Amino acid sequence: MEYRNYIARCLPLQWPYKVAYEKETSDECDVLVIGGGLAGSFAAINAAKKGARVIVTDKAAIIRSGCAGVGIDHWGSVYTNPCSKYTPDEILEQKITVRVKDDPYAMEFASYITMQESWEAVLELEEYGIDIRDSQDEFAGAPFRDEETKLMFAYDYENKHTLRLKGADLKPALYREMKRLKIKMYDRVMATSLLNEGGKAGNRIIGATGVHTRTGEFFIFKAKTTILSTGKPLRLWEFATDLVGSNANHDDPNSAGDGDVMAWRAGAKLMMLEKSHSSSAGRRYPAYGTGNCDNTWRPCSIVDATGKEIPWQDRDGNILTNVEDRMKPAPGQRFMLGGGKHIPYDLRGPSLIDDLESRIRSGEYKLPFFADLSNLPDYERRAVFGLMLGNEGKTRVPILETLQNAGFDPEKDMLQANVLSPEYTGADLTWWDVKAPGIGGPNIRDTAFMGGGGIVVDWSLKSTLDGLYAAGNQIAGVSGAASAASTGRYAGRNAAVYARSQMLVQPSQAQIQAEKKRVYAYVQREKGYGWKEVQLGLCRIMQDYCGDYRTKEIMEMGLWWFNSIRENELASTFAANPHDLGKALEVETRLTICEIILHLCLAREASSPRLGLNRLDYPDNGDRCGYFIAVSLRNEQAAIEKIPYYYWRSEESFRSCYKRYCCKEA
């Protein structure tokens, strides 16, 4: 059915908002923040506290926008909290963070910034009304609670570097603070481009353009400096909701890569966008909706179909009989991360027994398995099925409330674990390792989790373009709530200081008019394809030409197909209303991101287990090549550049670099 007729049939009512396509609204500020999620909110607040006039724009409602909009149950890297047994300097000196240990792609400097700022960010949240402690003494006496401070910790009860907190309403608290500081906020204004001084790509950034996704109004923001804090690109390999259910790959489903593409068109450098990992997770059940013993569910007991409990062990294979020991390092071990054989030995924490797979095959343990909360101590059961599940939106409503409404009682009922067959190979029952053989079709790939690609930044979190900073998931190699808040605080202060030395510059009218022509082309057509059809086509191309196995010829064919879609289907895509317009622009963004990914994968003539890149024509491991591969747009072509690993290192110590750039002084 032709798309206009489809829309008319399915949406017979008139569009409920007054449409004002091409109406221009202008505003100006010292610091413009694009993306009002966790990173953007902290950036805006800290820039305003430095005396800057701040504008925040987001294509959603800022009060709940971004990955953290639905809440947070735990907060990592709080190494400066009064209970932590480690300092940020000790962590970096010993290289014991998961993204630094033997990982050349780890952003050490961003990790250090996070470790220095994370606890201060949590204290900010407490100031804004978020309960970061067990203030009602609900868990008094629990081994994860510090009795003096009433702080509660997760995952490592010995070293105390990850907090449990009641973060369900974290974003509304930040929103109230932004209102108090009189920060100007534009809801549902989707940023579409960055403005360069003189209208020339590569020049200083002097603002941005946007379009309202309810009215279609065009916005022009003039700014002395700009911070990009949008999310990682998602839904590049899989879009159809009938296949993935409510699973959003651990991120905001609105994330399309807007910031990356705006930066690309403006001339900034990007890297690590070739990083993605294959997973069957999105084809299973809603995230965290099956029983397991890790992440939110840690340290849950697992039993088999006959009720026999699966033993836990420490890294040395010693069987753990005490639930509390599942959350502590082994004897003689100073520090631990998650459990499982994929974690280096010196950092490996407790997990289910290593030989579980062979014991399943021998018949000692019978599938299916179940998560058994009933045999946990009461405080652990309430921490999992209440405190943790109850403070993240992706679990509070679809998991906790749904199970409770169905009569699930964690004191006597069990939740089935997603182990589908004896071919299961993730012996730890972790939610990222569980395999789902026999489903068929390509697995979903995820670009966002555990530090995907993004913008190249320096110690000040400034991009390779003057006037442009990045925060949170916008930065190459960065992900997670603590990193978003920490880098947001840090970038906000730096941007505010930079803005003091700058003057507002009038944008190029030619650049603005060219952007308006691009944006409104979708609503000026009277017929054409719908954005969903084009989106599904992009995903199919990524599955076929940028999947689990790649070669030069395959990826070049993918680029050919994307160019064909750009010149044909995308050029005939029709938007029936401002919401449709926003979605069409997202499809164009995703198409561009897909092209960037293929350019980077082609340039990396090696396989890379760390990046999830398997090139059949270059099977050798290239992770020790010594450099990142960066890409930027030059003369309408992808320009490739090599950037050395650890490019942020200098003769100065990390502490000296942080002190130099943190801008904490007035």
Image (tube, grey):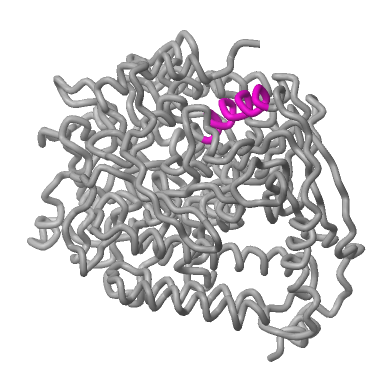
Identify the residue at horizontal 58%, vertical 31% (top origin). Answer: 488
Residue 565 falls within the magenta-colored stretch: no
Residue 139 x, y percent position in the rendering: 47, 23
Quadrant in which the C terminus appears = top right
Task: Point out the residue furthest to the top here.
Answer: 148
Compare residues 82 and 449 and report the one nearer the observer.
Answer: 449
| Residue 284 in sight | no
Task: Point out the residue furthest to the left here.
Answer: 362
Compare residues 430 and 273 and report the one nearer the observer.
Answer: 273
Q: Which contiguous range is marked in magenta?
A: 484-498
Residue 172 x, y percent position in the rendering: 70, 36
Compare residues 568 and 417 and report the one nearer the observer.
Answer: 568
Which image quadrant is residue 45 in?
A: top right
Question: Magenta-highlighted stretch: main secondary structure?
Answer: helix
Compare residues 382 and 172 and report the one nearer the observer.
Answer: 172
Q: How many marks?
A: 0
Residue 538 x, y percent position in the rendering: 51, 73
| Residue 204 in sight | yes
Residue 493 falls within the magenta-colored stretch: yes
Tell me if 151 is positioned left or right of 605 in this view: right
Q: Please determine whether, in this image, residue 41 is positioned above or below residue 8.
A: above
Q: Please determine whether, in this image, residue 182 is positioned above or below residue 341.
A: above
